[in-house]
Structure formats: structure tokens, C-alpha cells
Amino acid sequence: NQQILLDNRPEGEATAANFKLVSADTPPLKDGQVLVRHHYLSLDPYMRGRMNDAKSYAACQPLGEVMQGGTVGGVAESRHPDYQPGDQVVGMGGWQEWSVVDANQPGMLRKVDTTHVPLSYYLGAVGMPGVTAWYGLTQIIDPKPGQTVVVSAATGAVGSAFVALARARDCRVVGIAGGPEKCRYATEELGFNECIDHRQHQDLKSMSAALKAACPDGIDGHFENVGGHILDAVLLRANAFARVALCGMIAGYDGQPLPLQNPALILINRMRVEGFIVSEHMQLWPQALRELGGLVAAGKLRPRESVAEGLAAAPEAFLGMLRGKNFGKQLVKLI
Ligand code: NDP
């Protein structure tokens, strides 16, 4: 069983030298356990935060242990009555080819149906990132039909689910993404009304002017994945009573400070700005996953994926995703 461990903690930017590829035997199964062969491994921005030792909402990743993370795969062996060899499952198997899972522990393993939804989507559009988009849109932004909503990191795993959910609610949806190719994909394939290239608008004045042009009726809701001058510009263009779902601030994940230029705008616009962690709202996941699965089955949510081949490719694919090299949900294909 090949595995990738966190070997040492990054100082500033994470590098491939923070990880270590090793081989280990898989232990024999005990009662209640299931052996899963991973087909896809999910690479997510939150993993960057867990590599640090700093205080955070998520426990830090212990050194010398397999990198934790979401996986989908097939049951190879089972000593649990609810799981049979051949069942397809989603779990938190980590950066390795196989995992032994205690299936009695709640939330460790879930069977999935791949009739209408590709297996890999359970790590993206119909998985944690999809539910993240759903939560911020429905529970915080709560838009009315015709309102304008904006999302940053627009073509990524969360952003691509967000636009499908917002279009289903008849919103005008404006994305912010890196580069002309991603912006074209956003409008031509994902259904964004407009997409702003943040590489062309790297300061507050320029981003604010771009948002003004793309949002002639102002901004009623914003889903923030990036932070920095993007959030500042949105506050400048926000309508009275606008809502901001603060989901991620990836521009600061290597330790860059992201000061807010003018917090008084939150007061002036009487805004609601709310951070959230999707794993703290498990009771809403079934409802969210039902809607997301329905959109996929109906052909209204078919985002692209970036797929790296083989476990050894995981560190570089992960670091690339943090820098925007991914085009949609970043995965590693194992078999
Ligand atoms: P993505 O698939 O969107 O990949 C990350 C993207 O971030 C990159 O492709 C890049 O897109 C963008 N990015 C990186 N650095 C910068 C930068 N400096 N400025 C602008 N854009 C940047 O990842 P996810 O969809 O999985 O996650 C999106 C966000 O959601 C992250 O911030 C993540 O931490 C957060 N999140 C939060 C959760 C919660 O519970 N609160 C749960 C899940 C995710 P581009 O090339 O377009 O710039």
C-alpha cells in the first residue's frame, strides 16, 4: 500500500519536500472493518491549513501520518454486514491506495450510487465542495430571483457547483477567475452571466470598476473563496442588505496578511457577513446532496475535473491547485 505522509511543516509556501512517499502493509481486517481500494483521492485547499501547527478550526495534520483526505473507491473485503465487496463508497481514506475503515464509526463510510452520477463527482459537485456551495448560497446569501450574486474561485470545485445552484434560483451570476481560458469556460460551459479575470484586475480600483461593469444593478450576494482586494471591491459594489458567505480566503493560506480596507462599508451597506464550516452542518448534507445529485442527473451540473495520475503525483497536483493550475475539481486517479 503506497502512502503519502506529511513529513515536515511548511515555512511560508508549501513544497513537495513537505511530503514523503512510503510503502506499508495493510493490516488484516477485524470485525466491523472494511478494506477499500481507492479509485480517486480528493485534493482540497483546507489541507494546506492543516499542514500548519497554528490554531485553527480544524485539527492539524500530525507529522509522520498519512495525509488525511476524502476518497472514493470500491469495497475489496468486508467484515461488516452492511458492506459487500464491489460496493462503491465515499470516505476519508487519505492519501494512500487502500484503507481499512471502521465502518461502525458514524460518518466514516457511505455507499454511493453511480447510475446517474460519476463516482469522482462524490468528491466534488455531489460531495463536500458541492455542499459548501449549497450552504453558503441557501443558508447565508438566500437570494431572491433576479438578484445578482458573485463568486470568487469561480471555476473551481465549489464555484462550479455554486453557479448551477444560483442559476436554478434565477440569479444573475458573476464569477471571478484566473485567466481568459477559465473565464471563457465559466461563461460558455458553466453558465455564468459574466466572468472577471482577476489577473487583469490586480488592484482594488481596477477590480471595483470591473465589478461595476459586470453588475449594473449592484451586488446582492457574494460567496468569498479568495479574500484580499476581491472582497474589498465587492464591499464597494454591494447593495444595501447584501449578504456575504465567507467560505475561504485562499489568497492568505501561505500566511499572507489580508487586511480589510474599509470595514465601515459593512455598516454603511447594512450587510451580513458570515463565515461557516460545512462539516459543522451535517444535518443539512442530505438535502444539499439531493439537490446537487438531481442537477447532475438532469445535465445541469457537469463541471470539468483536473485529474492527476497515480499517488506519487498528489503533492505536485495539490501545490498546483493552490496556485490555480487546476481546471475544476482537483483529483488524483489511483486505479
Ligand atoms: P478550487 O477548485 O477553487 O481551487 C482553488 C482555486 O483558488 C484555484 O484554482 C485558483 O483559481 C484560486 N486561487 C488560488 N490562489 C488565489 C489567489 N491568490 N487569488 C485568487 N484566486 C486564487 O478549490 P475549492 O473549490 O475546493 O475551494 C474553494 C474555496 O473554498 C477555498 O478557499 C477553500 O478553502 C474553501 N472551502 C471552504 C469550506 C468551508 O467549509 N468553509 C469547505 C470547502 C472549501 P483561479 O485560477 O481562478 O484564481
Image (cartoon, helix red, strand yellow):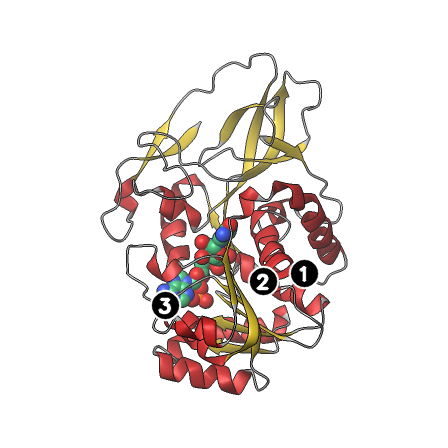
Residue type for callout 3: Gly
The residue under label 1 is 301
131 on left or right of 323: right
Of labels 1 and 3, earlier in sequence is 3
Q: Residues within 10 Å of mark 3 (few under 14, many from 20)?
A: many
Please provide percent x and percent y for residue 39.
56, 38
Please provide percent x and percent y for residue 289.
68, 48
171 on left or right of 236: right
The residue under label 2 is 160
Residue type for callout 1: Leu
Q: Residues within 10 Å of mark 1 (few under 14, many from 20)?
A: many
Q: Is mark 2 within 8 Å of ligand 1?
A: yes
**Cα separation between marks 2 and 1:** 8 Å
Of labels 3 and 2, earlier in sequence is 2
Q: Which quadrant does the C terminus fall into?
A: top right
Of the pair 236 and 313, the residue shown nearer to us: 236
For image coordinates 59% across by 44% down, the residue present is 281
Please provide percent x and percent y for residue 197.
45, 76
Label pair 2/1, CB-CB below 8 angstroms: yes
The residue under label 3 is 228
Q: Is mark 1 within 8 Å of ligand 1?
A: no
Q: Secondary structure at mark 1?
A: loop
The image quadrant of residue 31 is: top right
Q: Residues within 10 Å of mark 2 (few under 14, many from 20)?
A: many
Please provide percent x and percent y for residue 90.
60, 37
Q: Is mark 3 within 8 Å of ligand 1?
A: yes
